[in-house]
Image: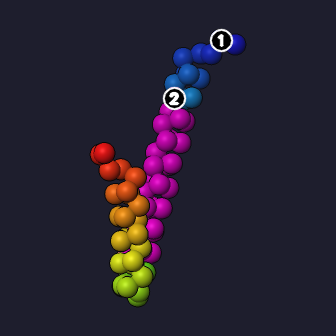
Amino acid sequence: MNRTASEARSQREGGARDELACQDVVHDLRQDVGQYLRQYAREQPEMAALWCLGIGFVLGWKLKPW
C-alpha cells in the first residue's frame, strides 16, 4: 500500500484538476441560470416581481429576529 512520491504527487495534481473542472462547471451553470433569469424577467416583468415579492415575504417571515 506504499505509494511513491511521484504517485502521491500525481494523485494531488489530479485532484486539483478535478476541483478546477468542477469550479468551471459551477461558474458556467451560474452564468447560464443568471442569463435565463434576466431573460425571463425581461419577458415577464410582472411575474418576476411577484416571485421576488413572494420570496422576500417568506424569507422575512422565517428570518425575523423575534
Tag 2 residue: 12
Q: Quadrant of residue 59?
A: bottom left
Q: Which residues are magenta?
A: 12-39
**Residue drawn 35% across and 64% down?**
56
Q: CA distance from mark 1 to mark 2?
A: 16 Å
Residue shown at 42% from the left, 57% from the top: 27
* Residue 9 lies within the magenta run: no
Mark nearer the N terminus (1 vs 2): 1
Secondary structure under badge 2? helix
Disc 1 residue crowd, few under 14, some 14–19, many 20+, Cα 10 Å: few
Colouring chosen for the image of the structure: rainbow
Does 16 appear in magenta?
Answer: yes
- Where does the N terminus fall, quadrant-wise? top right
The amino acid on which the numbered mark 2 sits, given as a three-letter code, is Arg
- Read off the residue under disc 1: 2
Residue 16's x, y, as percent? 48, 37
